[in-house]
Amino acid sequence: QVQLVESGGGLVQAGGSLRLSCVASGSIISINVMGWYRQAPGKQREPVAVVRGGSSNYADSVKGRFTISRDNAKNTVYLQMDSLKLEDAGVYYCNEEIRTTRGTYSFWGQGTQVTVSS
């Protein structure tokens, strides 16, 4: 029905940058909310950044360093991550609230690994 595919993760040194992408495909009428979450080993999944319409919200830990943006024409959401810290490491997931031909649902991507080295 709908698939979310993330990309852009990898290994980066502390202080470096990465740009994550998440492309949605399938029976999409519109995308209401697009967000990024992360999960570090042994920890719960937590919200990182969410964009709803023209409004964005960020976790306090990433404010000023991460930027979420969306390209509606491409059904894509990005997460620009700058000044990465060791504690930013984890699996990053995109989550979207999508209106489909069968109703409105929340979808998750498969995750992309971000590793930050010292």
Image: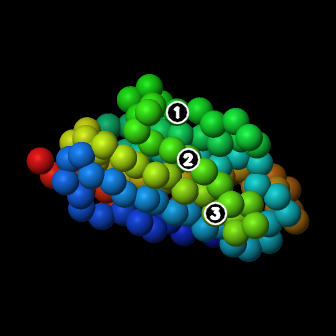
State how far apart marks 1 and 3 are (Cα): 18 Å
**CB under 8 Å between discs 1 and 3:** no
Q: Is residue 24 left or right of residue 43?
A: right
Observer-nearest of 50 and 1: 50
- In the picture shown, does residue 63 fall above or below 81? above
User: Residue 115: horizontal and vertical position, in percent?
Assistant: 25, 55
**CB under 8 Å between discs 2 and 3:** no
Q: Which residue is mark 3?
A: 76
Disc assigned to residue 58: 1
**Residue under the image location 32 percent in, 37 percent down:** 43
User: Residue 109: horizontal and vertical position, in percent?
Assistant: 54, 61
Q: Compare marks 2 and 3 and give the one earlier in the sequence.
A: 2
Within-10-Å neighbours for mark 2: few <14, some 14–19, many 20+:
many
**CB under 8 Å between discs 1 and 2:** yes
Amino acid type of disc 1?
Tyr
Disc assigned to residue 68: 2
Within-10-Å neighbours for mark 1: few <14, some 14–19, many 20+:
some
Q: Compare marks 1 and 3 and give the one earlier in the sequence.
A: 1
Within-10-Å neighbours for mark 3: few <14, some 14–19, many 20+:
some
Residue 100 visible within the image:
yes
**Residue under the image location 40 percent in, 38 percent down:** 65
Mark 1, secondary structure of its residue: strand
Mark 3, secondary structure of its residue: strand
How many dots with numbers? 3
Q: Is residue 91 left or right of residue 34?
A: left
- Considering the image in quadrants, where does the N terminus appear? bottom right
User: Residue 3: horizontal and vertical position, in percent?
Assistant: 63, 69
Amino acid type of disc 3?
Thr
Q: Residue furthest top?
A: 60
State how far apart marks 1 and 2 are (Cα): 9 Å
- Res 24 → quadrant: bottom right
